[in-house]
Amino acid sequence: MVKQRVLSGVQPTGSLHLGNYLGAIRTWVGEQYDFENYFFIADLHAITVPHDPKALAENTFTLAAMYLACGLDIQHTTIFVQSHISAHAELAWMFNCITPLNWLERMIQFKEKAVKQGENVSIGLLDYPVLQAADILLYQADLVPVGEDQKQHLELTRDIAARFNFQFGLPEQPILKVPEPLIRAEGARVMSLTDGTKKMSKSDPSEQSRINLLDSPDEIRNKIKRCKTDPTRGLAFDDSARPECHNLLTLYQLLSGQSKEAVAAECAQMGWGQFKPLFAEATIEALRPIQERYHALMDDRAQVEAVLRQGKEAAEEVAQQTLQAVKDALGFSRSL
Ligand code: AMP
Ligand code: TRP
């Protein structure tokens, strides 16, 4: 049986946190053997907001090391850097010319990020989801595992694919595969440690709001000690009046690898003073093997470089095929 194709990416814009891990990368790793996988580092997306040119290449490299440290297996997975494959930017241009402007103006993430940029919002920030559509459609992906916040971008990708197929393909011979989002309920939306109604985010100015995958045991204990809770004794899931409680129990459940029922029973009578150390140690233990592998890889940079070189070659082959099919459909002359 032919395996379905999975593709996803993360931007190299700072440390990965538990939201990135539990919302996205853990799903990639856990399900990689069932699929043919393409995971990339979205460095073209990282320049849609002001960035530091001195840090971009190193952040790209460390994110690749982190993908491997989290458990991606290159026997089953192609790992590559978006900007190494020029087809991404080329296809994004072609999609720009068939995507109505008002589809982009509706994007929630654009509106949120645009507010932060004030007068300096770039065309690239508005165009970000079109590039994302190109990333996905180039590889004819069946499934795209992401966190909940990317759902709207996936819908736009599906709309662009359908529009392209309708305008330039034949009904019985679509040029682009229309992908499905893969959003696992648990971990899809990890919330901030300082406000259980806001998602955990790289761009939150407070370090206290998130646990990074590379945080030391002491940093983890301190962040958890000071995280926001509530005055109620006895901890329970799914109480909409207690968003922090639900978030922390869910994190504990996922990181300790227990069932929801087991955690609900274990914590039903607990106070925060008893729960927090338990949660901190579970987090430290879950991150320990990832951190160990990460540091070993950073001591062996040649290994990571080889993975990216190999990934570029494999990804390029697939990307070029789709790009050529799109150019043919649009009527471009073939280069001689
Ligand atoms: P980004 O950091 O925006 O490049 O996001 C990388 C991946 O992590 C995407 O699949 C996001 O949906 C996912 N992600 C980011 N923040 C969270 C969060 N707080 N909860 C769950 N998933 C998240
Ligand atoms: N926009 C995604 C994010 O911020 C990153 C991304 C870029 C992506 N291209 C993609 C995710 C293609 C999935 C598929 O998380």
Image (cartoon, rainbow, N blue to C red):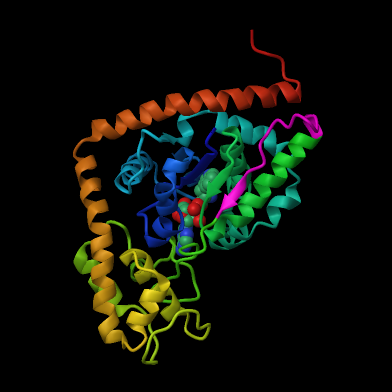
Q: Does residue 179 show up magenta in the picture? A: yes
Q: Does residue 4 show up magenta in the picture? A: no
The residue lying toward the viewer, choosing from 45 and 176, is 176
212 is higher (above) or lower (below) than 235: above
Give the image location of residue 229, x and y in percent: 38, 83
Which quarter of the picture shows residue 230?
Answer: bottom left
Give the image location of residue 330, x and y in percent: 75, 25
Q: Residue at x 38, y 26 (%)?
A: 310
The segment highlighted magenta reads 167-182
The residue lying toward the viewer, choosing from 261 and 245, is 261
Q: Residue at x 51, y 53 (%)?
A: 146
Residue 41 visible, this angle:
no
The residue lying toward the viewer, choosing from 293 and 299, is 293
Residue 154 visible, this angle:
yes
284 is higher (above) or lower (below) than 122: below
Q: Residue furthest front?
A: 1
Give the image location of residue 11, x and y in percent: 45, 47
Is the magenta region chiefly helix, strand or loop? Answer: loop
Left or right, 47 with respect to 332, comes to left
